[in-house]
Image (tube, rainbow, N blue to C red):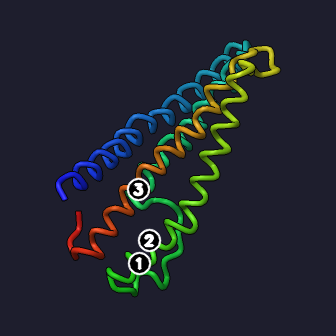
Amino acid sequence: MRTIRVIVRYFDAISEWSGRIFSWFIVAIILLSLFEVFTRRLLGKPTIWTHEIIAYCFCGAVLLPIGYTLKHRAHANVDILYEKFSPKTKTILDLITYTVFLGIFAFVLLYEGIEFAAASWAIMERTPSAFNFYIFPAKTMLPLGVSFLALQMISDVIRKIVFLVKGEFL
């Protein structure tokens, strides 16, 4: 049981810190947007790089803290009936939905995301714009973010199984 607690805490810590770190991409998006408005409107000299960097930061802000979002149960959901169920019924429903929906989704997205990013890395893909920046770092965020999601999903599944078997929350 001690090993299980350590694993759950470790996965939860990864989710927590990924959310805390990668949420700073939002600040970068705001600052870069302000910079672009300043250079374009006030100086009359727009940049060629800010829109692409903002898009990459947006990828990071959405994809990388996805495990954090699951940890804090902040994904959009409809829980009209769910709230009326007992904790045990909720746990069983969570295990079913995690396995059937989220598990399959994460597996397919991870598999396809790795192929997607690997193909981009293989050719050192770049944007066709004047800035001509590398694309593969942004494409790598997809499998990385899904990995964070999968770790948190595993942590939650372990926690729910322990609750069903032992009746205690981890």
Mark 2 surroundings: few (<14), some (14-19) or many (≥20) residues within 10 A: many
Residues under numbered marks 2 and 1 in contact, where contact means CB atoms less than 8 Å apart: yes
Residue at image position (27%, 72%) is 163
User: To which quarter of the image does residue 49 belong?
Assistant: top right
Q: Which residue is mark 3?
A: 154
Q: Tell me the kind of residue under disc 3.
A: Ile
Residue at image position (53%, 27%) is 31
Q: Tell me the kind of residue under disc 2.
A: Leu
Which circle marks residue 92 in the picture?
A: 1
**Rendered location of residue 75, percent (x, y):** 50, 60
Q: Secondary structure at mark 1?
A: helix
Mark 1 surroundings: few (<14), some (14-19) or many (≥20) residues within 10 A: some
Using the numbered discs, state the Cα–Cα distance from disc 2 to disc 3 in whole angstroms: 10 Å
Work out which residue is located at the far right of the displayed protein and give it. Answer: 128
The answer to whether 57 is drawn above or below residue 82 in the figure is above
The answer to whether 125 is drawn above or below residue 109 in the figure is above
Q: Which residue is mark 2?
A: 95
Using the numbered discs, state the Cα–Cα distance from disc 1 to disc 3 in whole angstroms: 15 Å
